[in-house]
Amino acid sequence: MSASLRFTRSFTAEPVHIDELGHVNNSVWVQWIQDLATAHWDAAAQPADHAQFFWVVIRHEIDYRGNIAVGESAVGTTYIPDPPKGAKSLRVVEFTDEAGKPLVTARTTWAMLDRETGRLARVRPEVLAPFQLSETQ
């Protein structure tokens, strides 16, 4: 299988993101994980696939290694490391601080559904092809 293209986006902690410990709340990290994955799909998916399918999270596995405070930024990077399995696809998300120190890493499993029927849809290789590097790249 080809290597996966990486998608990156920056997130800045606002006062609403901060918990009583003075840093970004864990629930915000989960939202940012979902926002990053959705932005990747929106940016890379073929228009026909985007129109026909949508994704739902079925599992998050998250490791919290660090955090940021209000006004600080985290860089989120995501990629799809493996071929899909049926209707499921694994996604890796990594957040680092501005100095590159790891903050949060996640392995999230998503299921693809058909928009018209709302039923699970097998992820065909061509649906994930825009997220992969070809052998010539």
Image (tube, rainbow, N blue to C red):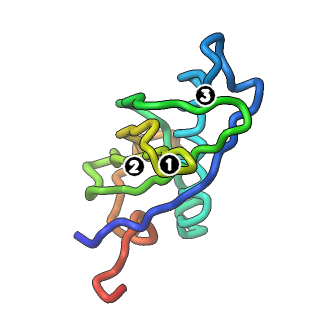
Judged from the image, the secondary structure of the residue bearing numbered disc 2 is loop
- Residue 1 lies, with reference to residue 78, above or below; the image says below
Judged from the image, the secondary structure of the residue bearing numbered disc 3 is helix
Disc 3 or disc 2, which is closer to the eye? 3
Query: What residue do we see at 61% from left, 26% from top?
Result: 24
For the N terminus, the image quarter is bottom left
First in sequence: mark 1 or mark 3?
A: 3
Residue at image mark 3: 28
Q: Quadrant of residue 108?
A: top left
Answer yes or no: is residue 56 visible.
Answer: yes
Q: Position of residue 104 (x, y in %)?
A: 44, 36
> Are there few (<14), some (14-19), or many (20+) residues within 10 Å of tag 2?
some
Mark 1 touches mark 2? (CB < 8 Å): yes
Residue at image mark 2: 121
Q: CA distance from mark 1 to mark 2?
A: 6 Å
Q: CA distance from mark 1 to mark 3?
A: 28 Å
Q: Position of residue 75 (x, y in %)?
A: 56, 50
Query: What residue do we see at 59% from left, 21% from top?
Result: 25
Instruction: Work out whether residue 6 or residue 97 is closer to the camera in this orientation and state it.
Output: 97
- Residue 74 lies, with reference to residue 123, above or below; the image says above
The mark tally for this picture is: 3
Instruction: Work out whether residue 69 or residue 19 is closer to the camera in this orientation and state it.
Output: 69
First in sequence: mark 3 or mark 2?
A: 3
Q: Position of residue 94 (x, y in %)?
A: 43, 46
Residue at image mark 1: 114
- Residue 76 lies, with reference to residue 127, above or below; the image says above
Query: What residue do we see at 28% from left, 83% from top?
Result: 135
Amino acid under label 2?
A: Ala
Q: Residue furthest left?
A: 1
